[in-house]
Image: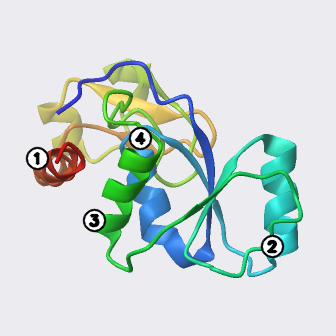
Amino acid sequence: MQGPGKPASVRLIVDFMCGKLARWLRVLGVDAEYYGETESTKLLKRALNEERTVVTRNTRIPSAYSVEVLLVKSEIPEEQIVQVIKDLHLEHRLAPFTRCNVCNVELNDVEKDDVKGKVPLYVFQTQGRFKMCGSCGRIYWPGTHTRSMKAYIDRILEASNE
């Protein structure tokens, strides 16, 4: 698996049809804003204003704007992730666990003492590294769930290299 390196420089806006994809792209360190509304004109305007590539399964997205659109073919999130990685050539530009998977902001390293009382006592006692979202304040640490997420990411990266 790619280590914490330089995050991918691509900027995406993922529509309501691909919510799980948006979350996993964030886990992989990709700037992937989630757009939960169904209005495609507003989506395209936002993509244009923020210089983002639209990621969608909607085959009826109008091409009236000068916006790059990546049409996702599969309904299966794992296959969607592999397609995005391949189509945007992100294989070696991923930085897993560097973005908030809720609000898409890059995470900051924080001192252990700064999370005291903000995480469960057992987590505070057993973990040494913490990251925090500067926007929503969510705190992340390499817990037991991280192992299964890393295994999933490894499978995705293997598939994207095929």
User: Mark 1 vs mark 3: which is more N-terminal?
Assistant: 3
Q: Secondary structure at mark 1?
A: helix
| Alpha carbons under labels 1 and 3: distance apart | 17 Å
Horizontally, residue 159 falls left or right of residue 120, namely left
User: Mark 4 vs mark 1: which is more N-terminal?
Assistant: 4
User: Mark 2 vs mark 4: which is more N-terminal?
Assistant: 2
User: Mark 2 vs mark 3: which is more N-terminal?
Assistant: 2
* Dot 3 amino acid type: Glu
Q: How many marks?
A: 4
User: Mark 1 vs mark 2: which is more N-terminal?
Assistant: 2
User: Mark 4 vs mark 3: which is more N-terminal?
Assistant: 3
4 or 3: mark nearer the eye: 3
| x and y percentages locating residue 157 in the rendered image | 21, 44
Q: Residue at x 55, y 76 (%)?
A: 57
**Image quadrant containing the N terminus:** top left
Closer to us: 53 or 132: 53
* Dot 4 amino acid type: Ile
* Residue at the spot of label 2: 62
| Alpha carbons under labels 1 and 2: distance apart | 41 Å
Q: Secondary structure at mark 2?
A: loop
Closer to us: 43 or 121: 43
- Are there few (<14), some (14-19), or many (20+) residues within 10 Å of tag 1? few
Labelled disc at residue 78? 3
User: Does the CB distance between marks 4 and 1 fall below 8 Å?
Assistant: no
Labelled disc at residue 11? none
| Alpha carbons under labels 2 and 4: distance apart | 39 Å
- The correct choice, above or below, for 136 with respect to 18 in the image is above
* Residue at the spot of label 4: 139
Q: Quadrant of residue 91?
A: top left
| Alpha carbons under labels 2 and 3: distance apart | 26 Å
4 or 1: mark nearer the eye: 1
Horizontally, residue 29 falls left or right of residue 69, namely left
